[in-house]
Image (cartoon, rainbow, N blue to C red):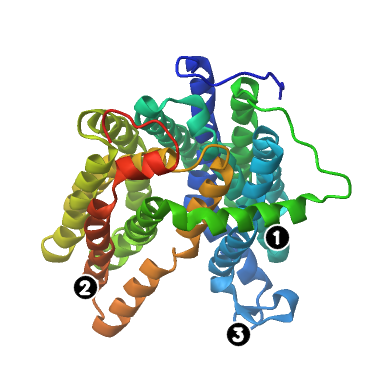
Amino acid sequence: MGATITHNTATGYSRREQAGWYFYDWANSAFSTTVITVFLGPYLTAIAENAADARGYVYPLGISVLADSFFPYMISLSVGLQVVFLPILGAIADYSHRKKQMLALFAYIGAFATVALFFVEGDNYELGGILFLIANLGFGASIVFYNAYLPDIASAAERDKVSSQGWALGYLGGGLLLTLNLAFVQFLAPALGIDTGTAVRICLVSAGLWWAGFTLIPLARLQVRQPIKELPPGGRFATIGFKQLRHTLGNMPRYWQTMLFLIAYLLYNDGIQTVIALASQFGAQELGMETPALVQLVLMVQFIAFFGALGFGYLARLTGAKQAIMISLVIWFGVVVYTYAFLRTQEQFFVLAAVIALVLGGSQALSRSLFSLMIPRGQEAEYFSLYEVSERGTSWLGPLLFGLSLQLTNSYRFAILSIAIFFAAGLILLPLVNVRRAIQEAGNDVPAQV
């Protein structure tokens, strides 16, 4: 982690540094796909079931928990920890100028905790839960510092392109490792006499090693732009972090347009995350899709999303990021309406998933780059911590609405239609955001297309 001091000028952006930054998305996406999306949930649930009593309950810290609910509860708890800690960590990073060091610290905390999941077997569900909490907290924190680098490595004019390319590479990396791991579990492991449980643990280790290994690339290329700021005598980072965060929150009303965008993002992104989280359940319950078909669907989405993210980066250069995001929201809205009214077959579901994949990365990558233009210089980690926390803090709204709709109507179609309200809210609020004014209020350069 070299401490080369450079100055970021309008012409001083390095393609080499940008390429290094892309590779952190390639690195950490292994955790998202291999660990969270596919392998850890079923595996940790089986471990919890091994430890359960006759009624199917386990008792972490003396609390009665249904074994099948243990992993969802761990996800919720990990989100709660991020809501508490990420803003403080972001404030510390901005105050101390240790953004790169904190990216490295939390990336390797997360990666090594993921590798340690190899030792979770038998009925040791508590160890698995603790390691997942640590890994997911490290993942979330490292994303804050990674995103906060975007204003440092790209000019306002090329921010959309750079953000989209990073997002695209993440889909490619995550999809590639997941493909290798699925091939290992289904074909190579049985041929070698490796049981399924051990094969899954090896896959979890591979995700941690992938994450740790490829993180070396951004750490070698990302530059430190300000001298490290030490604590004053008697000072503590936790205290400084709280003070810095309080100051930032107190100043946020000055950036009303930024806040309005953040509110719009929280709503439409909650719709996106709900579709991602519950699409497989819809396919299984409503269309009768088996696990192999759902796995093929996940892989297809990963690779098509690579091209979708790049395509929306190009679209943003023609229309501006705000307009491109609105186009994606119209498509998202159309997807849920089509699912409700017309979707009947598995083949149609695959076509619809391909459409989702095209807008998936683009809507998220362009939201990130647009937000990066609206935040004050020197407070990138703090604002991106609020960006991440807000996303996680509201991520229960969509699933809650889906669940209530399903319970009241007993129809997955009405449940998926209910998610349209989040995309509609985004389409109502986003046009109200004066992007040019928001960028100017933050003291940043306004690109030709916004």
Q: Where does the image place residue 289, in percent across and percent down from the top left?
A: 29, 58
- Classify residue 3 as left or right of residue 447: right
Q: Element type at marker 2?
A: helix
Q: Which residue is mark 2?
A: 414
Q: Mark 1 or 3 closer to N-term?
A: 3
Residue at numbered disc 1? 130
Q: Within the image, what quadrant is residue 277 found in? A: bottom left
Query: Which is nearer the N-term, disc 2 or disc 3?
Result: 3
Q: Which residue is mark 3?
A: 55
Q: Nearer the viewer, residue 38 or 362?
A: 362
Q: Which residue is at a point 32% across and 57% down the rendered structure image? A: 268
Pick out the residue farthest to the left. 342
Q: Amino acid at mark 1?
A: Ile
Could you give the CA–CA distance between mark 1 and mark 3, rounded to whole angstroms? 24 Å
Residue that protrudes farthest toward the right in the picture: 234
Residue drawn 47% across the image and 39% down it:
178
